[in-house]
Each structure stands twice: as C-alpha cells, then as structure tokens.
Amino acid sequence: MTACKCVRSTQEEAGDLPAVLWTHEEVAKLLRITPDRLYRLVSAGEGPPSFKLGKLRLYDPAELAKWLRQRRGDSEGRTR
C-alpha cells in the first residue's frame, strides 16, 4: 500500500478543523469506485461533501462517514 497523501495540520493551527483530510483519489479508492465516477456523483450533488483547495478536492473523514450512514439508511428498504 502506498503512503497516505492526506493533508495534515497541527491541532493548534487547525482549531476546529479535522487533523486529516482525504484526497479525491483516496475517497474513490475507499468507496471502490473510479475517481471519475466520484466526480460525477459530487457534481450531481449525490456524492459526499467535499471542497476544493486549489486543484485538490478534499474530504473530511467525519463527513464521509456521515454521508455513508445516510446512504445506508436510504437503501435499507430497497432490495436488489
């Protein structure tokens, strides 16, 4: 496994900000989808919350977990 390219900051510098932010590619890998598919979900307003910092799209792990819980709750009544 390759080293994490997470964006890190010290607690003192960050205040209430998360200590680790995940990149677009890391989140796509975690979700087992392509970065392009994740981009389309985010663009359509159906993906996890994210923000851009320069050319980077970043994700807060806590917000990603919340989004996944909501998606799981939305799909519980559905069958495949």
Image (cartoon, rainbow, N blue to C red):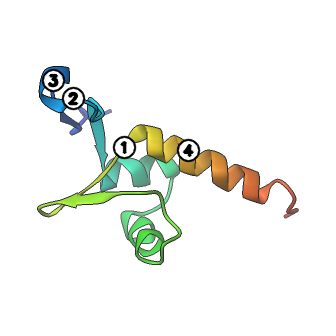
Task: Relative to 43, say whether 55 is above or below.
Answer: above
Residue plotted at (85% across, 62% down): 78
Tag of residue 66:
4
Amino acid at dot 4: Lys
Q: Distance between the residues labelled 2 and 1?
A: 15 Å
Task: Tell whether 45 sits left or right of 59.
Answer: right
The residue tagged 2 is 15
Marks 2/4: CA–CA distance:
21 Å
Is residue 33 toward the left or the right of residue 39 in the image? right
**Residue 9 to residue 69: above or below:** above
Gap between marks 3 and 1 measured at Cα:
15 Å
Give the mark toward the camera: 2 or 1: 2
Task: Name the residue located 43 percent from the left edge and 63 percent from the top edge.
Answer: 34
Judge by depth and name the residue closer to the eye, 13 or 19. Answer: 13
Q: Earlier in the sequence, mark 4 or mark 3?
A: 3
Give the image location of residue 8, x and y in percent: 19, 32
Q: Earlier in the sequence, mark 2 or mark 3?
A: 3
Q: Considering depth in this image, is 54 or 11 the residue closer to the camera?
A: 11
Q: Name the residue under label 1.
A: 60
Of pointers 2 and 4, the one earlier in the residue sequence: 2
Residue 73 against residue 16 in the figure, above or below? below
Spatial separation of the CA atoms under disc 2 and disc 3: 9 Å
Q: What element carries label 4?
A: helix
